[in-house]
Image: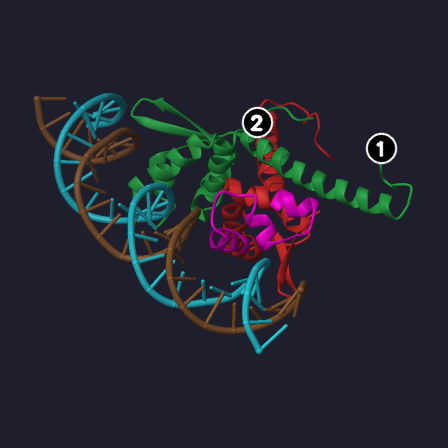
Chain colours: A green, B red, C brown, D cyan
Amino acid sequence: MVVDQLSDHEVDRLFHALADATRRDIVRRVMRTESSISELARSYPISMTAVQKHVIVLCEAGLIHKFKQGREQRVVGRVDAVQRAQQFLDSYEQIWRDRLDRMGDLLGEPTPGGKT
Amino acid sequence: MVVDQLSDHEVDRLFHALADATRRDIVRRVMRTESSISELARSYPISMTAVQKHVIVLCEAGLIHKFKQGREQRVVGRVDAVQRAQQFLDSYEQIWRDRLDRMGDLLGEPTPGGKT
DNA sequence: CTGATCTACAACCATTTGGTTGTATTTAAC
DNA sequence: GTTAAATACAACCAAATGGTTGTAGATCAG
């Protein structure tokens, strides 16, 4: 199920990009509807430069894709980055489940939900 | 499926806590095995104070639970915070799927995987 | 061509972050 | 009762973050 392994630094950037409400809102918006930077900027009480910087952070994290169209910079969401983050969190859940299994083993129980 | 709604600030803290490799490693470790702060500190090339601060950040994000045991501060992972993060990312994936559905509608296709 | 719009980028600033060292407190061990 | 260990916490520091303003370059409309 693991499609791709991310480096520590890539995971840093991914979660850091998600750790800001404005950036999360931008991701939600462009996941729904492709948009330009100035269109985005009109929605937030901050300067266009600030929005631009958020877009750069999101782009470096792989959460969005930018492409030039005339004088506009179009921005669109990338669901694959979200899925990579999910896979990453899945591995944490798995560690937890493994721990429960080991605790079950210690009690001599026949691991209820275990595969095998 | 949504168990709990998190405030912007809570989501900020959750993802910010995950945006650091040392903190992620601590979460992985205590998800596997409960541990004390000084035990953790021995694993990293940073001071115990630095580890303590990471533990505080993780605790405020809900990713770990601390409790005193004698002179030790025991730390254990909390899988429910990971699951809340997953639910959050699920909603992003859903937005993407809704977009695909809408694009399908525009083409007059009978939404292949759509429920109904 | 001119003007308006969209973007890019440099420079600056306050705050937060991730680290340090040093000191004090609690608790276990002898 | 000392001593050693584990933690707590204050004070400090450099770098990163999230914002600003100002200036300059493309590009579209009339």
Q: Which region is colored magenta?
A: B27-55
Residue type at mark 1: give it. Answer: Lys
Verify whether residue B40 appears in magenta.
Answer: yes
Percent coordinates x, y for residue D22 in the rendering: 14, 42
Q: In this view, does A48 lie to the left or right of A31?
A: left
Most foreground residue, A91 or A57: A91
Residue type at mark 2: give it. Answer: Met
**Residue A53 found in image quarter:** top left
Which label number is shown at residue A33?
none
The answer for which chain carries disc 2 is: B
Query: Which residue matches tag 2?
Result: B103
Which label number is shown at residue A115?
1
Q: Is residue B4 left or right of residue B103?
A: right
**Is residue B5 something that shows in the picture?**
no
Q: How crowded is mark 2: few (under 14 residues within 10 Å), some or many (20 or more)?
A: few
- Marker count (numbered): 2
Could you tell me which residue is drawn at 46 percent across and 36 percent down? A13
Most foreground residue, C3 or A78: A78
Percent coordinates x, y for residue A7 in the rendering: 52, 29
Q: Determine the secondary structure under disc 2.
A: helix
Verify whether residue B104 appears in magenta.
Answer: no
The answer for which chain carries disc 1 is: A
Percent coordinates x, y for residue A102 in the rendering: 80, 43
Q: Determine the secondary structure under disc 1.
A: loop
Could you tell me which residue is drawn at 65 percent across and 23 percent down? B109
> Is residue B10 placed above or below A5 in the rendered structure?
below
